[in-house]
Image: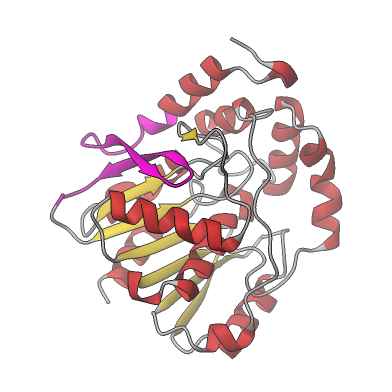
């Protein structure tokens, strides 16, 4: 039934499942208890393969957005894609506790990896999910083997002021119409899967908790990150300056490979990425 603000849980579930159907046929749904409630995880790939945990971006993004890379990644890893706590998805947040700090997000990921039976894992994220992944790698280096970041926000450079002004109406009062208009404007309408776009619209008005925010990681902390990092920035990103992101990361990360994803914007990732992205990620994970 629709809720206040126009959110329709049934429509959201239908849209979520439609995108999930694009995953490999062997995918399965897991529910993992964490200190902040139950997290929904979509999994695929050999159960005895090394684990890879994927985190989506913020806003209306969910774990199912990784469908375009899931098959490639599942050839070399047991893939686990998680819905973020308190964000759009099929998890069940704790009634009296949600993440408020970076330390809370780290505790959530500790609980998630524990529940998956993974002492350590490869970790990948897009946008806000990449920000979470990077902070976790800094706080729990023994649990992160390799790290890939897709157009990460607030990690190595700040937002463009014009982007924040453009996003403001959608952030203040999200509606399906505003979400669609914003995404089409930011991406030029290119590379947007209609089913994925319907899911972003269906997430408008989701009763989400306020996302965790914090300053960018300190340069001295980044210089101490031992894990190999693959940093992929969107050539057409309106979120930040791609060249600035690559240059800043190159100055502080000791083991980083940086590349530009051509002809793609920030909000088209990961589903609208070039077809070869999955192979590039598997090559990085294979070392």
- Residue 20 lies in the magenta-colored region: yes
Total labels: the figure holds: 0
Nearest the viewer among 206 and 270 is: 206
| Residue at the extreme left of the image, as rendered | 48
Picture quadrant of residue 244: bottom right
> Is residue 275 visible to the viewer in this orientation of the structure?
no
Quadrant that contains the N terminus = top right
Relative image position of residue 231 (x, y in whole percent): 50, 72
Left or right of 115? Residue 54 is: right
- Residue 79 lies in the magenta-colored region: no
Q: Is residue 282 above or below residue 62?
A: below
Left or right of 153? Residue 163 is: right
> Is residue 227 visible to the viewer in this orientation of the structure?
yes
Please name the residue shown 52% across and 15% down the image. 10
Relative image position of residue 83 (x, y in whole percent): 46, 42
Q: Is residue 70 above or below residue 135?
A: above
Q: Is residue 202 above or below residue 38?
A: above
Please name the residue shown 46% across and 31% down the image. 90
Relative image position of residue 26 (x, y in whole percent): 21, 36
Tell me where the magenta segment starts and ends, as one range.
18-47
Left or right of 192? Residue 64 is: left
Tell me, what colour scheme is on the image? secondary structure
Please name the residue shown 47% across and 19% down the image. 14
Nearest the viewer among 188 and 183 is: 183
| Residue at the extreme front of the image, as rendered | 96
Picture quadrant of residue 199: top right
Please name the residue shown 59% across and 81% down the image. 249
| Residue at the extreme top of the image, as rendered | 1
Quadrant that contains the C terminus = bottom left
Nearest the viewer among 6 and 126 is: 6
Relative image position of residue 252 (x, y in whole percent): 58, 88
């Amino acid at each position: 039934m629709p809720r206040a603000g126009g959110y329709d849980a049934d429509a959201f579930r239908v849209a979520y499942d439609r995108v999930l159907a694009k995953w490999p046929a062997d995918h399965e749904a897991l529910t993992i208890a964490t200190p902040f409630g139950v997290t929904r995880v979509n999994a695929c790939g050999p159960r005895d393969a090394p684990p890879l945990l994927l985190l989506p971006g913020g806003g209306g993004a969910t774990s199912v957005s990784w469908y375009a890379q899931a098959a490639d990644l599942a050839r070399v890893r047991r893939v686990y894609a998680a819905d973020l706590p308190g964000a759009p998805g099929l998890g069940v947040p704790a009634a009296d506790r949600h993440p408020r700090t970076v330390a809370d997000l780290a505790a959530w990921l500790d609980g998630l990896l524990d529940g998956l039976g993974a002492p350590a894992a490869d970790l990948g994220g897009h946008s806000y999910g990449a920000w979470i992944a990077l902070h976790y790698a800094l706080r729990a280096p023994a649990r992160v083997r390799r790290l890939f970041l897709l157009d990460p926000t607030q990690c190595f450079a700040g937002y463009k002021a014009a982007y924040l002004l453009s996003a403001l109406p959608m952030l203040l009062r999200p509606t399906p119409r505003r979400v669609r208009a914003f995404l089409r404007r930011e991406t030029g309408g290119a590379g947007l899967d209609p089913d994925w776009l319907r899911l972003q619209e269906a997430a408008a008005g989701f009763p989400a908790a306020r996302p965790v925010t914090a300053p960018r990681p300190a340069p001295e902390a980044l210089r101490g990150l031992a894990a190999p990092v693959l940093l992929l920035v969107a050539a057409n990103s309106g979120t930040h300056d791609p060249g600035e992101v690559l240059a800043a990361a190159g100055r502080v990360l000791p083991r980083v490979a940086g590349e530009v994803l051509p002809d793609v914007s920030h909000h088209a990732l990961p589903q609208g990425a070039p077809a070869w992205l999955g192979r590039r990620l598997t090559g990085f994970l294979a070392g």
